[in-house]
Every structure is written in C-alpha cells, then in structure tokens.
Image (cartoon, rainbow, N blue to C red):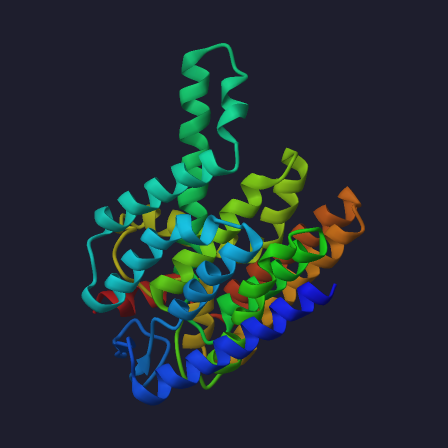
Amino acid sequence: MFSVMQDFLLSSFVSFLLFRVFLKNKLFLPKDKPNARSSHVKPTPTSGGLVLLIIGILFSFKTNFWIPLISSPLAIVGLIDDYLKLSPMVRYFFQLLTAVAIIFSTNLIYITDSFDSVLIRILSLFFLILIATAIINFINFMDGIDGLVAGSMSIILTFAIITGSTYLIPIFASLIIFLYFNWQPSKIFMGDVGSYFLGSIFVSEVFSKTNIYSSLILITLCLPLILDSIVCIFRRLCHKQNIFSAHNLHLYQRLYQAGMKHSSIAIIYIGFVLLMGLCSMFDNLYLIIFSIMFTIATGYYLDKYVAVSFSNSLIKGLK
C-alpha cells in the first residue's frame, strides 16, 4: 500500500512540475489554432499528453508494465502529427503496428493458436487488430472538448486499478494532474500524442483480461465514447462523406454548437462512464444492460432535442 501511495504522489508531483515548466516556457507545445470545426475560440497549447507518455515510460521500469514503451512509437507519431498533420495512412500504419505489438505482449496471440483452421486464426487476428485500432481512433476522435477524454479515462483507469491493475497508478495520477490543467477553460490540450497513448493503454487492458466477459465489461465503461464515434461514422457514411476528413459532427461537438458549455458536456460523458463503472461493480448482467440502454436512450434524447441536428451541422460544415 505504501508503494502504491508513493507512486501516486511521486507521479503527481513530477507531472505537475512538467506541466508547469512546459506551459511557462512553451516547450514542445505547438498551438492548436481555432478553425471552423473547432470547439475552442483561442489558440491553446497542445501535446500535453507528452507528460503522460514520459510518466508511463519512467514508471515502466519500476512496475514492469511495458505497454507505455510499446505505445511510444505511436505516441511520438501523434506528437509529430500535432505539429505537421501527417496523412491518415501514416497514422493508421503505426496504429496497426501498435495493435499487433499489444496483441503479442498480452499473449492474446496464443488464443488464436487454439483454432485448428489457419483461416480462422488469420480472421481472429484481423478482428483483434480491427478492434484495437478502432478503439484507439475512437478515443482520439472524442478529444475535442475540455476535460471529456481526460475525465472519462480517469474514471476508467480508476475501475481498472480497483480490479487489480495497480501498475496504472502512475499514469492515473498524471492524468488527474492533466485534467486540472485541461478542465474548462483549458490551459492545455492532450493532443494526438495523449489520445493515442491513452487509447493504447486502454486496449492493452481490454486484451490482458483473463476472459471475454471481463474484457467486454471494460469496453462497456468506454461505451459513451465508443457509441458517439460509431454512430457518427455510420451517419457520415450514409451521407457519403470521407470518414477520414476533419469534421464537427460528433454529438459532443453538436451539443457545443447548441450552446452547451465544455464542462457541462464533459460532465455528461464522465457521468455515464461512472454509471457504467458502478453498475459493473455489482456484477449483475441485468443492471449492466439497463445502464447501456439508459445511456443509449439519453444519447438519443440529447441528439434529437438538445444538440444541433446532424443535417444542419453537416450543411454548415460544408460551407
């Protein structure tokens, strides 16, 4: 217990110090300039997720949790993208490499070896890679409102730690400190370096579970973020849009367009992540299903009666 508290306090102190130094001296922090699709109105330093990466790597040597090192190439690509805006193909290539590395590092590859058919093995591996890259991208897509992803992932890491993943404590502590600087009005964004890193950490947790049920429960915690992304992608496909191009059509973005504050939107998503987590603690399937249906119903209500409509936002974005 003392070691856990020591990791939390040390990570918090180092993270706070790094954020203060970065913000004061403008080190490594490109400015995210507002545009027609942005949810912020003034240039804001980004790439704050670099601190999460640094903390993750430093504590890897103490906790023997090596996923931060495995995720670092993708995170660095995210950092470069924050500066130079790389092509989607380059980013996805490194997401694929990271997904494969995580699958092998969590020994999930041996599950596919249990199938007799080579075709089934290949399809299983392809399916796992698809899930991993999708989750990484979904978390990245949702990072557009102050505190939304940082707050949601803080709750998710909390429940992961409660269920035994204490090696996540240094990253969790760093994320809490980041949330302090990222809450509305945000002083710093996490950037792609942060969202890719957190997405990779989450994927590794999902894939490291000992059974499918535990993995699905963890995915359920992230459902508010995943559902927003999936629904938005399908809607854009129906409107024959390029799903790899920038846009402002997510529910959280359209709630902002309707006049809702960043903090209010973030609290809604964080609240539903917390609801999912609390329901999962009771290990009651009916309660979990109820929480999922309640989240979907509330999302539908917000989409239909509160947010700017998808069609109107689409038309405005095309102008």
Q: Is residue 76 left or right of residue 102?
A: left
> In the rendered picture of this protein, how many numbered marks are placed on residues?
0
Q: Is residue 76 left or right of residue 257?
A: left
**Residue 261 location in percent, x, y?**
49, 81
> Does residue 112 show up?
yes
Quadrant of the rendering where the N terminus is positioned: bottom right
Q: Depth check: 274 or 17 in front?
A: 17
**Residue 239 location in percent, x, y?**
31, 50
> Does residue 296 show up?
no
Q: Is residue 175 above or below residue 217?
A: below
Residue at 49% across, 75% down: 15
**Residue 54 location in percent, x, y?**
42, 65
Q: Depth check: 53 or 83 in front?
A: 53
**Residue 139 location in percent, x, y?**
45, 57
Quadrant of the rendering where the C terminus is positioned: bottom left
Q: Is residue 131 left or right of residue 75?
A: right
Q: Depth check: 274 or 177 in front?
A: 177
Name of the residue lying farthest toward the top? 116
Residue at 60% across, 67% down: 270
Q: Is residue 84 above or below residue 244?
A: below
